[in-house]
Image (cartoon, grey):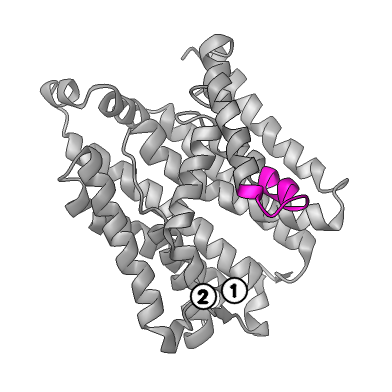
Amino acid sequence: MTRATGRKSLVLHLGVVALLFLLQFVLPEYHHLTVTRIMILAVFALGYNVLFGYTGLLSLGHAMFFACGLYAAGLTVYHLGWDVLPAFLFAVAVAGAAAAAVGMIALRTTGVAFMIVTLMFSQVVYLATLYFSRYTRGDEGLVLPARARSFELVGIHVNLADPVTRYYIALGLLAAGILVVHRLVRSGTGREWIAVRENESRTRMLGYNTFSIKLKALTVSGALSGAAGAAYALLFAYVGSTFASIQYSIDALLFTLLGGAGTVLGPVLGSFIMFYLIDIFSEYTTAYLLATGVVLILLILYFSVGILGTLRRKWLHWLP
């Protein structure tokens, strides 16, 4: 990518962030809250895309990293009385460490075996949230106390119960996620990920440690997913076992495939489209998942590599 196209790409991604910032001033109350939730889930999808879109590793267990962040933040605040910021940072570290630990085992497999191993680990985390219901309350979940709804930052009081504040924090996290992924995929690290995705055997033959490359991708992916989980717990004051279920792993995959795997903004676009498809169809029919599935099939027929992936293939070749 040349310097000119690099600048063009950066301007586009900053423009998307600016658009989301301006959007809050015209959104009704319901959509204001909805977009806040979508932005958090988009960070989760960004993390998934690092592993699947750029490194070519299909995981069915990414909900475990989202749940690691969710519970690490929620339980430390609820049971140990931690402040919001230390709980968030701890949660990101826990999710990243969990991804590295899982990767040491799961990355010794490939293809379908990798999918199954990640799914098994994810189910262990999900069942653990149910088994230790004395602390997690399982499917019922925990509602975080009022003291966890605010914190002090450089002398400024931040109220997490305020919708505008939640929107700004979600947008800030999404912007940070977009810029981090954008920077990584344009660096040597990103080129290594893509090399593994395109031809791991040749990459190994050229002298690269492909296990280390994949482990780095999984760790970054897990940390981003954990950051999304922690933010969800702290912003919406709720922690529940549902977030550790396989459904959330599938959601991240669908967001990524729909928007365009291997594009920075693809998972963000996919998150918005998928969320609103379900939201709109659920107003008119109880078979909203069927209707959503039909629309997704039509989209995939015309956008075989996702919406942004297809646009990049045909016209916007400079998209990272």
Coordinates of residue 181 in the picture (x, y in percent):
47, 37
The secondary element bearing badge 2 is classed as helix
In front of the other: 45 or 182: 45
Q: Report the amino acid beneath label 1.
A: Tyr
Is residue 249 shown left or right of residue 151?
Answer: left
The region drawn magenta spans: 276-289
- At 77% from the left and 50% from the top, the residue drawn is 284
The secondary element bearing badge 1 is classed as strand
Which of pointers 2 and 1 indicates the residue nearer the eye?
Answer: 1
The reply to whether residue 204 is in sight is yes
Q: Which mark is residue 238?
A: 1
Coordinates of residue 230 in the picture (x, y in percent):
52, 64
The reply to whether residue 265 is in sight is no
Label 1 neighbour load within 10 Å: few <14, some 14-19, many 20+: some
2 or 1: tag closer to the N-terminus: 2
Q: Is residue 279 magenta?
A: yes
Give the CA separation, mark 2 to mark 1: 8 Å
- At 44% from the left and 39% from the top, the residue drawn is 49
As drawn, 273 above or below 95:
above
* Quarter where residue 140 is shown: bottom right
